[in-house]
């Protein structure tokens, strides 16, 4: 099985249809497949073969998609690398994943010991390739699993392992996700997220179904707003950050989203305030999705009910859910199993059988299921603040702080204390023009009104920025 061949077969009847639009440039499915095959031919001449790990360092573009498909067509393995990462971080990925080749757009990496890739398949970018010397080959099991992608984890916990997905797993998980997304060839997808972190269950699914993908990541939010008006998009896949900007922008009137059938919110917890503001302006209920790179996209909140906004929905048909080690409030560890699970961790090597316990994957998240089967995530098990034996979930406290009118963003964490275990503390970014000397006491009073006393941060510190991972998540 090969993902590229599947896309090629699935889109035969769409060869004249626009596949991807970038700015004023559009490429049809026939042209995209041809581009990928031309690039693949060039890569093969460079020595790229099956099982080779090819680091792809490129900004979001038609060329990113074509290059990814080219690598997959050779049954080589795509190792996506974000252009936001430093050279040291890039080198860490190259070494940890034992990358055989680095394919990078001009200007994104040191050209030393590399040379240009000549291919008519590229459209706007100039690419270079660097061959890497591998001192030790992967273990024998690697060559038995038909690998397609190795995604470095986002680093939220400080540990990155390299998640291996096979061609079979990608086909399974895109089909599984589509039971909630219901993508068709009539959809026009407005895309703003980073392809380095969101590609397998989304871009590849959209291509398999013959949609038109409109790239809107440059000059955000202007580009997205221009494309919403120009193309009458039907589907948005974005983060709460993007939806907050759309809701607050004077450039986009409420009626311009009349054709949107689904607006997926992912990558981070959807704040209630963002959902409220977006619905008030556009009359569209944001659809929160819960994706896990090891698992896929097992949850999509399809309720269209404002009373279920804090939930990620019911589990999709091809997955199972259980909550282990519940406390008195029915909160416990979220475990999932189903189709399209990871094959292994690359470095250090761990096979699927060692990662999954009787097929179950421990997500590391904590949550509860209500009587109707809706899952609410309350935090990460490693992020829980333990105050005198009482659990405090940073996400819960942050959601309250972020509802205060003068706060733009917050980060809640635990500070070790010899007597109490940990004290909840908060960093806050205030909105422009807000005086911290006047607002902090009001913020503290607001928190005491909304939270149990022990959950209120013992100190609030105003900061100019909150550390984030390259995928936009708070570093905890």
Image: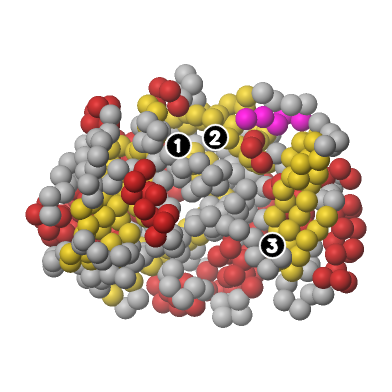
396 or 289, nearer to the observer = 396
Secondary structure of the magenta portion, mostly? loop
Going by the picture, which residue comes out furthest to the top?
A: 358
For the residues labelled 1 and 2, the Cα–Cα distance comes to 9 Å
Q: Is residue 372 a member of the stretch shown in magenta? A: no
Query: From the image, which quarter does the N terminus lie in?
Result: top left
Q: Which residue is mark 2?
A: 363
- Determine which of the numbered discs, if any, sits on residue 409 in the image: 3
Q: Earlier in the sequence, mark 1 or mark 3?
A: 1
- Judged left or right of residue 138, residue 372 is right
For the residues labelled 1 and 3, the Cα–Cα distance comes to 29 Å
- Judged left or right of residue 278, residue 109 is left
Residue 207 in the image: state x and y as whole percent.
30, 54
Please report the bounds of the magenta region as a residue range.
329-333
Q: Which residue is mark 1?
A: 295
- Which residue is at 81% across, 58% downward? 460
Residue 23 in the image: state x and y as whole percent.
35, 76
């Amino acid at each position: 099985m090969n993902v590229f061949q599947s896309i090629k077969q699935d889109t035969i009847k769409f060869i004249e249809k626009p596949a991807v639009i970038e700015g004023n440039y559009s490429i049809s499915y026939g042209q995209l497949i041809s581009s990928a095959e031309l690039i693949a031919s060039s890569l093969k001449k460079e020595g790229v073969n099956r099982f080779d790990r090819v680091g792809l360092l490129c900004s979001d573009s038609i060329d990113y998609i074509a290059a990814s498909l080219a690598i997959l067509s050779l049954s080589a393995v795509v190792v996506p690398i974000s252009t936001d990462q430093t050279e040291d971080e890039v080198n860490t990925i190259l070494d940890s994943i034992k990358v055989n080749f680095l394919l990078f757009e001009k200007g994104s990496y040191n050209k030393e010991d590399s040379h240009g890739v000549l291919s008519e398949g590229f459209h706007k970018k100039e690419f270079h390739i660097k061959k890497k010397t591998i001192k030790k080959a992967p273990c024998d099991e690697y060559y038995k699993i038909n690998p397609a992608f190795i995604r470095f984890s986002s680093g939220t916990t400080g540990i990155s392992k390299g998640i291996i997905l096979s061609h079979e797993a990608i086909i399974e998980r895109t089909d599984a996700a589509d039971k909630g997304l219901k993508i068709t060839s009539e959809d026009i997808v407005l895309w703003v997220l980073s392809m380095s972190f969101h590609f397998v269950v989304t871009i590849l699914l959209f291509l398999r179904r013959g949609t038109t993908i409109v790239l809107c990541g440059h000059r955000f939010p202007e580009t997205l707003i221009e494309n919403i008006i120009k193309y009458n998009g039907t589907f948005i896949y974005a983060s709460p950050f993007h939806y907050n900007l759309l809701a607050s922008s004077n450039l986009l009137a409420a009626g311009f989203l009349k054709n949107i059938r689904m607006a997926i919110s992912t990558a981070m917890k959807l704040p209630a305030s963002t959902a409220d503001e977006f619905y008030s302006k556009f009359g569209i209920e944001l659809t929160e999705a819960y994706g896990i790179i090891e698992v896929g996209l097992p949850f999509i909140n399809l309720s269209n009910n404002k009373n279920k906004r804090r939930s990620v929905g019911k589990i999709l048909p091809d997955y199972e859910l259980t909550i282990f080690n519940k406390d008195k409030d029915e909160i416990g560890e979220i475990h999932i199993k189903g189709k399209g699970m990871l094959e292994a961790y690359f470095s250090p090597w761990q096979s699927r059988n060692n990662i999954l316990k009787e097929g179950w994957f421990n997500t590391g998240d904590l949550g509860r299921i209500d009587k109707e089967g809706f899952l609410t995530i309350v935090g990460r098990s490693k992020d829980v603040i333990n105050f005198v034996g009482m659990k405090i979930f940073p996400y819960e406290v942050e959601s309250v702080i972020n509802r205060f009118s003068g706060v733009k963003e917050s980060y809640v964490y635990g500070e070790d204390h010899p007597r109490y275990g940990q004290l909840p503390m908060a960093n806050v970014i205030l909105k422009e023009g807000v005086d911290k000397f006047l607002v902090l006491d009001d913020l503290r009073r607001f928190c005491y009104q909304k939270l149990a006393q022990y959950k209120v941060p013992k100190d609030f510190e105003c900061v100019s920025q909150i550390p984030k991972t390259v995928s936009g998540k708070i570093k905890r």
